Image (tube, rainbow, N blue to C red):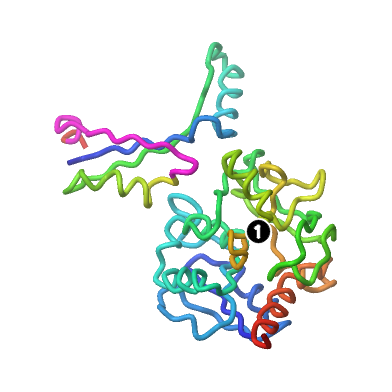
C-alpha cells in the first residue's frame, strides 16, 4: 500500500511557522485567511499497513506535540508517480 | 571519575564537552554504533545535529545502538547529561519529560544568557547555590521547551526544574522560562544552554564548569558512601 502520513502540530501548541505564514499572506493581498498551521507530509510504500500507527507513534511523529493521520494513496494516484 | 561523551554522526559539541569534562575528571568518547559505555561513571549526550536532525531533532539518534546502553545506564541510576541536541535526544528517548519545539522567533539564537539556579541539592547543580546566576551561552533553533500545563505543574512541584532563564533572558519562548529539567529520579538532566562552552574566563564565563563539578562531586560521594 502507498500511504500518506499527515503530521500536524497538536491543537493548542503555539505554531510560529503557521503564524508567520498567516501574517505573510495578507501582505501579498490574500485577505481572509485564518488558522494557518504548518505540518509535514510523509509518503511511503508499506507492505503491512497495520503497522503504520506504531510507526507513527514511535518514529514518524512525536505524539506529545504532533497529531497524525494516515491516508491511503489510491492506485490511480500512485501510478502517476 | 570518568565521563563518556557520545559521538553521533553530526555531533559538533562533543570535543568541547570532552575537554570540559576533562577539566574535572577523565573523559572518553563513546561511538554511537557501539554497544559499549566503557565503564564510565557519567554519560554526556552533546550538542550538534545528530543524524542531520532529520525528521525531528533527536528522533533518529535516540535509536542509535549506544542509546540502548545509555537508557539501561539511566534506568539503573547512572548520571546522564543532555546538552542542547543531547537534551532533544533524551526527550525523544522518553528519558526526560517534554519536547523541544522551534524557537518562537523561528530564528537561530546564539548568545550568552543568564540562568537562575532553582535547585542546588542534586547531582547536576550541587556545586551551585539556589538562586545563583550562571552566565552560559545558548545556540539553537529548536529550543522552546514544551510540556502540557499539567505536566509543567508536576515538573515544578516535583522539583524537576533545575534551571530557569533569568527574567528577560528566555531566548526561545520556553514555557515558564524552563532552561533545564531532570527526570523524576533526578539522575538524568537536560538543558538547552551549553555549559561546555563556558568553562574558561577566556570565553567570557567559567560558570558552566559548575555542572561538571557537581557531577564529579556526586559520583565521588557515591563512591565513598
Give SS at disc 1. strand
Which quarter of the figure has residue B190?
A: bottom right
Residue position for label 1: B191
Q: In this rendering, would B198 be left or right of B107?
A: right
**x, y percentage for residue B211?**
72, 70
**x, y percentage for residue A50?**
21, 44
Q: In this rendering, would A77 be left or right of B96?
A: left
Q: Residue at x 29, y 44 (%)?
A: A53
**x, y percentage for residue B161?**
68, 54
Which quarter of the figure has residue B77?
A: bottom right
Q: In this rendering, would B187 be left or right of A1?
A: right
| Quadrant (top left/top right/bottom left/bottom right) for the C terminus of chain B | bottom right
- B106, B3: nearer the viewer: B3
Q: Residue at x 79, y 47 (%)?
A: B169
- Mark 1 neighbour density, 10 Å: few (under 14) some (14–19) many (20 or more): many
Please provide the residue range marked out in magenta.
Answer: A63-78
Q: Residue at x 56, y 68 (%)?
A: B45
| Quadrant (top left/top right/bottom left/bottom right) for the N terminus of chain B | bottom right
Tag 1 subunit: B
Q: Residue at x 56, y 62 (%)?
A: B86
- A54, B141: nearer the viewer: A54
**x, y percentage for residue B48?**
57, 62
Residue furthest to the front: B225
Q: Is residue A67 magenta?
A: yes
Amino acid at each position: 500500500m502507498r500511504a500518506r502520513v499527515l503530521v500536524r502540530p497538536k491543537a493548542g501548541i503555539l505554531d510560529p511557522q503557521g503564524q508567520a505564514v498567516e501574517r505573510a499572506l495578507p501582505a501579498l493581498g490574500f485577505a481572509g485567511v485564518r488558522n494557518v498551521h504548518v505540518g509535514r507530509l510523509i509518503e511511503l510504500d508499506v507492505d503491512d499497513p497495520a503497522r503504520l500507527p506504531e510507526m507513527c507513534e514511535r518514529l514518524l511523529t512525536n505524539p506529545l506535540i504532533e497529531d497524525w493521520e494516515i491516508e491511503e494513496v489510491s492506485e490511480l494516484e500512485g501510478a502517476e508517480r | 571519575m570518568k565521563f563518556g561523551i557520545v559521538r553521533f554522526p553530526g555531533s559538533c559539541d562533543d570535543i568541547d564537552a570532552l575537554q570540559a569534562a576533562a577539566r574535572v575528571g577523565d573523559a572518553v568518547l563513546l561511538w554511537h554504533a557501539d554497544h559499549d559505555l566503557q565503564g564510565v561513571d557519567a554519560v554526556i549526550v552533546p550538542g550538534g545535529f545528530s543524524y542531520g536532525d532529520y525528521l525531528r531533532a533527536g528522533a533518529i539518534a535516540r535509536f542509535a545502538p549506544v542509546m540502548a546502553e545509555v537508557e539501561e545506564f539511566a534506568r539503573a541510576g547512572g548520571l546522564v547529561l543532555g546538552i542542547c541536541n543531547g537534551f532533544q535526544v533524551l526527550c525523544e528517548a522518553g528519558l526526560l519529560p517534554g519536547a523541544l519545539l522551534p524557537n518562537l522567533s523561528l530564528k537561530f539564537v546564539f548568545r550568552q544568557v543568564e540562568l537562575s539556579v532553582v535547585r542546588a541539592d542534586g547531582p547536576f547543580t550541587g556545586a551551585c547555590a539556589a538562586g545563583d546566576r550562571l552566565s552560559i551561552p545558548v545556540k539553537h533553533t529548536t529550543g522552546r521547551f514544551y510540556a502540557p500545563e499539567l505536566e509543567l505543574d508536576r515538573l515544578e512541584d516535583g522539583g524537576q526544574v533545575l534551571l530557569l532563564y533569568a527574567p528577560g533572558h528566555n531566548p526561545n519562548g520556553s514555557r515558564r522560562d524552563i532552561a533545564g529539567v531532570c527526570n523524576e529520579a533526578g539522575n538524568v538532566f537536560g538543558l538547552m544552554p551549553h555549559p561546555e562552552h563556558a568553562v574558561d574566563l577566556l570565553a567570557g564565563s567559567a560558570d558552566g564548569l559548575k555542572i561538571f563539578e557537581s557531577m564529579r562531586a556526586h559520583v565521588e560521594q557515591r563512591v565513598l558512601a
